[in-house]
Image (cartoon, grey):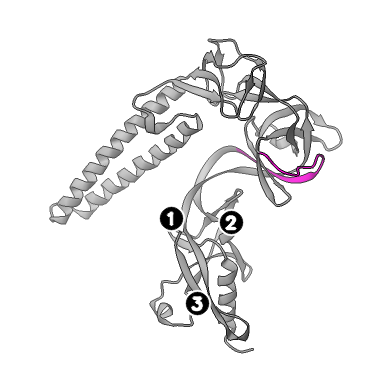
Amino acid sequence: MNKILLPLTLLCASVFATEIPTQQVRVHDFSESKKLNAKVIQLSNAQEAITSVVAGHLEKYFVKPAQIVKKGQKIALMESIVVSKMTADYLALKKQLASSQKNYEALQKLYDKGMTSMSQLNNESIKKSTIAAQLNALESQLLTLGINTKQLTQATANYTLYSHSGGKISALLKPLHSSVSENDPIANIAKEQAYYIKSYLPIEYATKAKLGDKIFVHYAGQKIETHITQIMPKVDEETQRVIVLSSVDEKVDNLFIDAYVEATLYFGKSFKHLAVKKSALSFFNNEWVVFVPNENEAVKEEEEAVPYAIKVVKILASDEDYVAVDGLAQGEEYVGGKSYFVKSALLKSSLGDGD
């Protein structure tokens, strides 16, 4: 992370240097979200469903009923045509990218000698970037399935289901060699004295939420990631909301039962957009802004000038750490934290040096 020194004048005209962290605007995955009312509960022998991410064929169980399992332990082996195609496409794109890289390097040499045009060089660069983006997206999907792309040398239809948490296998729900649809439960794990988040979901969102979707909870200054394990079939009479249970898989100290918490559900297909860290946003002159290094040479040479400019942005979406914005370019540098120092300096600069 780059560091930029910003001089600020404080009381008694003392001057100190504050390190201002900077980031670069990047593409980030966002999902649709919904704020929920929720509370902490604890269930004895709570059930967690292990589900198939893609449709396939159940080839093998690595566990038996009543067996104790740990988080990350193998549960079942699946075979899927979808996975076969994904791995084949990944390997093909990897070869295409290597070929495009060689073509680009060859064109670069020809261009340096004046034997080809900038247009041809740019076209190959665009082609290379497109292939790289497709490859990265596919790699992310395969990693979700637990497939290590670095060790992938040939197409495969096999992928493994793992336990998201420790507990006891309470049931194997599908017979061997049976067909399994996407999001079908394969096995249940009973977690003794497990903590859960009980969320109240508006009815219009009930069909959008799926098992395994993330619900982030803010509790006593902590951010806790949970995953939906149960969607109750009956509407709560008092609130007219659908009850959703999500498991707290990480260890959380001082988690009090029946404490009401703020929760956010993320669901549906994700979309990509340029994003900045939440800590970069500042409300300035009734607009959301991000501070960027000032490229004006005159400002750079002026000793007491604030070397930052204001960029007004439009907020489109957000998650726990990032905000999707319009108004910035990919790779553009921005102040990623301590933006209040920059804001104070800019306000002081606009008011002048008087009292």
- Few, some or many C-alpha atoms within 10 Å of disc 3 (few <14, some 14-19, many ≥20)? many
Q: CA distance from mark 1 to mark 2?
A: 16 Å
Q: Residue at x 64, y 28 (%)?
A: 166
Judge whether 165 appears above or below 273 on screen: above
Q: Nearer the viewer, residue 130 or 244?
A: 244
- Where residue 295 sits in the image (x, y, percent)? 41, 71
Q: Secondary structure at mark 3?
A: loop
- Residue under the point 50% across and 47% down: 28
Is 349 inside the magenta-drawn segment? no
Q: Position of residue 152 (x, y in %)?
A: 37, 28
Residue 278 badge: 2
Residues 91 and 66: in front is 66
Disc ID at residue 306: 3
* Among the 4 quarters of the image, the one containing residue 30: top right
Q: Which portion, as a residue range, is magenta?
A: 251-267
Horizontally, is 303 left or right of 342 in the view?
left
Please tell me how crowded label 1 is: few (under 14), some (14-19), or many (20+) other residues with Cα within 10 Å: few
Q: Nearer the viewer, mark 1 or mark 3?
A: 3
Q: Name the disc covering residue 330, or none.
A: 1
**Few, some or many C-alpha atoms within 10 Å of disc 2 (few <14, some 14-19, many ≥20)?**
some
* Residue 32 percent location from the top left of the image: 61, 42
| Rendering coords of residue 78 (x, y %) | 50, 18
Decide which of tag 1 and tag 3 comes sooner along the chain.
3
* Nearer to us: label 1 or label 2: 2
Q: Which mark is residue 181?
A: none
Vertical order, 133 against 293 (above or below):
above
Per the model, the C-alpha gap separating discs 1 and 3 is 24 Å
Which amino acid does the dot numbered 2 rest on? Lys
